[in-house]
């Protein structure tokens, strides 16, 4: 029996097939890591551009792994750059509604900061499950399918995330 012909990532139809199969997953992966929606989109596109640039070196079977590895590295580079920029820039004041009291605005901002810090302190696997469930309204079964885990593993990660958040918020 003849082996099946290898798909060439450098061929435009094959590249498009990979894009349509994996773009949404790569974008969501970046979002769950902590990128905002537009940053996730930009980094996902950059990962695909790099795969196109290096298509001769990327076997079809390894394309998905290549995309996720490149996307993860791009995210880390972006976060490092963001930290450098924040050292030299002041944050712009948040626009507020006129009917909110300054006290309410302050408390709201403080609560938002506490929640963001607490979520950021979660271990990555717990943070991803927590955000997929609470932000994307995904069921545990959907999360398990997406992350190639069992539903029990997702339940355990979510349980640990909630316990961890409670402990972190008590300490902040």
Image (tube, helix red, strand yellow):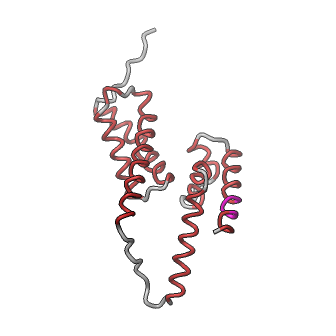
Image position of 73 with respect to 133: above or below: above
Toward the top, the furthest residue is 1
* Image quadrant where residue 61 sits: top left
Question: Residue 146 in the image: x percent, y percent?
Answer: 56, 44
* Image quadrant where residue 147 sits: top right
Residue, x 57% and y 74% (percent of image)? 111
Question: Residue 70 in the image: x percent, y percent?
Answer: 40, 40
Residue, x 43% and y 48% (percent of image)? 76
From which residue to which does the magenta span run?
Answer: 163-167
Question: Residue 157 in the image: x percent, y percent?
Answer: 67, 50
Residue 151 or 80: which is nearer the viewer?
Answer: 80
By secondary structure, the bulk of the magenta-drawn segment is best described as helix
> Looking at the figure, which quarter contains the C terminus?
bottom right
Toward the front, the furthest residue is 88
Residue 117 or 44: which is nearer the viewer?
Answer: 117
Residue 118 or 150: which is nearer the viewer?
Answer: 118
Q: Is residue 10 left or right of residue 101?
A: left
Residue 139 or 45: which is nearer the viewer?
Answer: 45
- Image mark count: 0
User: Is residue 126 within the magenta segment?
Assistant: no
Question: Residue 13 in the image: x percent, y percent?
Answer: 31, 33
Image position of 140 with respect to 169: above or below: above
Residue, x 38% and y 21% (percent of image)? 6
Residue, x 55% and y 61% (percent of image)? 135
């Amino acid at each position: 029996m003849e082996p099946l012909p290898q798909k060439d990532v450098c061929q435009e139809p094959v590249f498009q097939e990979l894009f349509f199969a994996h773009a949404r997953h790569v974008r969501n992966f970046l979002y769950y890591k902590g990128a905002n929606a537009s940053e996730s989109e930009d980094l996902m596109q950059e990962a695909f551009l790099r795969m196109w640039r290096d298509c001769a070196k990327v076997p079809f079977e390894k394309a998905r792994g290549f995309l996720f590895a490149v996307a993860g590295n791009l995210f880390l580079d972006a976060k490092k750059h963001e930290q450098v920029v924040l050292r030299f820039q002041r944050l712009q004041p948040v626009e507020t509604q006129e009917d909110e009291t300054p006290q309410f605005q302050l408390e709201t901002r403080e609560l938002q900061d506490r929640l963001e810090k607490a979520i950021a302190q979660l271990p990555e696997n717990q943070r991803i499950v927590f955000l997929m469930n609470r932000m994307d309204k995904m069921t545990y079964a959907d999360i398990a399918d997406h992350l190639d885990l069992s539903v029990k593993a997702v339940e355990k990660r979510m349980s640990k995330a909630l316990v961890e958040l409670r402990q972190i918020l008590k300490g902040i």
